[in-house]
């Protein structure tokens, strides 16, 4: 018997977004992140946050429902920078925010200034990592992304990923009083170019987690196509297949219309876009824009 399918509710000051198995797929815009962006890193070190405004606009226009904000720049005060970035993003959009940092002090600084109910990115199944971050998640009434890997390695087997998910859910709910609905599992999308079986492992992991725990799930959508040509085509195939298995959100660059359109089409075909209302509205908006 499958577990009840849960809803994860995120809020900005004025808007609520529901991540769920029977709702439209949640697109988490990943672009507000300096990783691999040398010029953006230099701007942030100099205290120039102007590029964030462009990134927010591009991700929202591309269809992002939630915005991931990461300010992990070496040689900066990440806590101060993240708090400033989140404050700025909240003035630019009413989309909820996913606060993304590996630094506990930065997460708390971001949560302290955030107006609404955030998603925190992320924890693993490591005991010390959960002990550091789950109290913050509880204190600020946030939701949490959790990855089923531990101090040993990233597990390649479905059973190990499910086992570590079970541990995370058990610890978060019983030791920290976090609702199971507020745990979003990242089932670990891996590069298909390194191992041709990783996508199949991912899909099976998603199905197992959905059926046993009913929780919502997300992933770094671009991971699967890393190092391969025609990455957008691979992404446009991967996400609808993952949605069929039970994936309910993805952290991705929404400036890629080919992938966003594939997700929206899958929403229609999976019955998550009632009567195709959002699909038809988007088509009419495009027609009006080109008229």
Image (cartoon, rainbow, N blue to C red):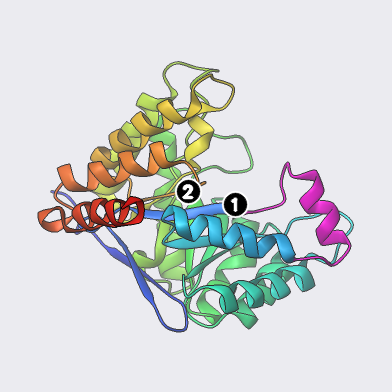
In the rendered picture of this protein, how many numbered marks are placed on residues?
A: 2
Q: Secondary structure at mark 2?
A: loop
Please indicate, yes or no, whether residue 96 appears anywhere in the rendered image: yes
Reply above or below: 145 against 134.
above
Q: Marks 2 and 1, Cα distance to the nearest angstrom?
A: 8 Å
Q: Quadrant of residue 87?
A: bottom right
Q: Where is residue 268 shown, x and y percent of the image?
A: 18, 47
Q: Secondary structure at mark 1?
A: strand
Name the residue at 37% across, 33% down. Answer: 236
Name the residue at 35% across, 25% down. Answer: 200
N-terminal-most mark, 2 or 1: 1
Q: Where is residue 61 shown, x and y percent of the image?
A: 46, 58
- For the residue pair 124 and 266, the one nearer the viewer reads as 266
Q: Tell me which segment is drawn in magenta.
A: 32-49
Q: Where is residue 97 shown, x and y percent of the image?
A: 52, 68
Q: Residue furthest front?
A: 291
Q: Quadrant of residue 196?
A: top left
Q: Which residue is mark 1?
A: 31
- For the residue pair 210 and 155, the one nearer the viewer reads as 210
Mark 1 residue crowding within 10 angstroms, few (<14) / some (14–19) / many (20+)? many
Name the residue at 54% across, 20% down. Answer: 228
Reply above or below: 23 against 200.
below
Q: Is residue 44 magenta?
A: yes
Question: Does residue 169 appear left or right of residue 73 in this picture?
Answer: left
Q: Where is residue 25 shown, x and y percent of the image?
A: 31, 52
Please indicate, yes or no, whether residue 155 appears anywhere in the rendered image: no
The disc at residue 84 is: none
Question: Label 1 near label 2: C-beta < 8 Å?
Answer: yes
Q: Which residue is mark 2?
A: 254
Name the residue at 54% across, 55% down. Answer: 58
């Amino acid at each position: 018997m499958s577990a009840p399918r849960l809803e994860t509710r995120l809020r900005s000051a004025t808007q609520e977004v529901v991540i769920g198995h029977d709702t439209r797929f949640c697109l988490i815009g990943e672009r507000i992140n300096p990783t691999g962006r040398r010029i953006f890193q230099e701007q942030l070190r100099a205290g120039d946050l102007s590029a964030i405004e462009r990134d927010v606009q591009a991700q929202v226009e591309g269809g992002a429902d939630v915005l991931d904000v990461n300010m992990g720049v070496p040689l900066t005060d990440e806590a101060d920078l993240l708090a400033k970035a989140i404050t700025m993003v909240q003035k630019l959009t009413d989309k909820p925010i996913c606060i993304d940092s590996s630094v506990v002090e930065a997460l708390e600084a971001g949560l302290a200034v955030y107006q609404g109910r955030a998603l925190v990115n992320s924890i693993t199944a490591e005991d010390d990592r959960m002990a550091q971050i789950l109290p913050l998640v509880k204190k600020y009434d946030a939701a949490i992304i959790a990855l089923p890997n531990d101090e040993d390695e990233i597990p390649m087997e479905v059973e190990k990923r499910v086992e570590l998910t079970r541990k995370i859910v058990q610890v978060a709910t019983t030791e920290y009083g976090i609702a199971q609905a507020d745990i979003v599992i990242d089932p670990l999308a891996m590069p298909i170019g390194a191992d041709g079986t990783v996508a199949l492992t991912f899909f099976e992991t998603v199905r197992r987690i959905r059926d046993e725990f009913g929780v919502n799930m997300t992933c770094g959508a671009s991971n699967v196509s890393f190092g391969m040509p025609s990455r957008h085509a691979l992404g446009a195939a991967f996400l609808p297949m993952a949605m069929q298995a039970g994936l309910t959100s993805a952290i991705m660059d929404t400036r890629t219309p080919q992938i966003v359109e594939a997700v929206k089409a899958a929403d229609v075909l999976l019955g998550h876009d009632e009567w195709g209302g959002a699909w038809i509205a988007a088509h009419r908006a495009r027609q009006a824009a080109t008229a």
